[in-house]
Amino acid sequence: MVASDFNFHVDVPSDSHAWGLLDILESFDLSQLIHSPIHKAGHTLDFLITHSDTRTITKTKISDPCLSEHLAIHFTVSIPEPPHFTKTITYHKTKTIVTEDFVTDLNASIVNSYSSSITDLKQSYHYILLLTLDKHAPMCTMTITVSPECKWFNDGLLAQRREVWNLK
């Protein structure tokens, strides 16, 4: 979608530049949706351009807010929301762990662990850590709704949103 003041008089049949622009739009399968005068002098200078097969622009309306020599173009953009889906996740509630108890159990388990090879020792520590974690923060399961990724929503916007939430 493109909305702009192009300053081409598409309502003037002798304006070859305006008709050339419309030909270019047509060659790219684009449509100019404003067909009535937008300028106080009676010309169509402002365009609202979309792809010809899209139905995202509806309810176009022109009004005079008395702010300039151009009239205002109002329109509704209808964009369907991408579907959400659910996903089951598993996690440990690590925030509920009492650190002192966890460390005590971990130390007691490691003291009793002996091995002759580094590989066996690593596997043993891994197993001990998992058992201790499962004891102090059992595995939980939750079904969540996953929203489609918004490519325009980046870390900077997320930080600003959190800042606003914190101010409330």
Image: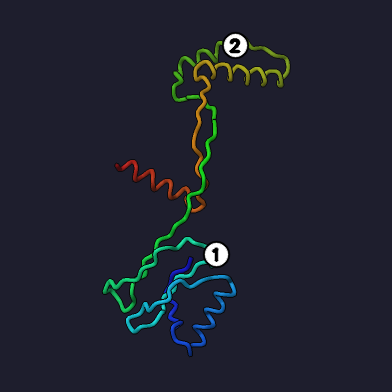
Q: Residue at x 55, y 14 (%)?
A: 107
Q: Which residue is mark 2?
A: 111
Q: Amino acid at mark 2?
A: Val
What numbered label is drawn on residue 12? none
Residue 117 in the image: x percent, y percent? 73, 18
Relative to residue 38, is residue 118 depicted above or below? above
The part of the image, by quadrant, that contains residue 114 is top right
x then y, percent, for residue 134:
54, 18
Residue 54's x, y, as percent? 52, 62
Q: If the image is split into quadrants, where does the C terminus sit?
A: top left
Q: Secondary structure at mark 2?
A: helix
- Badge 1 marks a residue whose secondary structure is loop
Residue at the disc numbered 1:
53
Label 1: few (<14), some or many (≥20) within 10 Å?
Answer: few
Q: Nearer the viewer, residue 15 or 138?
A: 15
State the residue at coordinates (55%, 10%).
Answer: 108
Which of pointers 2 and 1 lies earlier in the amino acid sequence? Answer: 1
Extreme residue toward the left, this view: 66
Q: What residue appears at the point 44 percent right and 25 percent down from the top-left corner?
A: 95
Q: Is residue 168 above or below residue 125?
A: below
- Mark 2 nearby-residue class (10 Å; few <14, some 14–19, many ≥20): few
Q: Is residue 88 above or below residue 45?
A: above
Amino acid type of the residue that numbered disc 1 sits on in the rendered structure? Asp
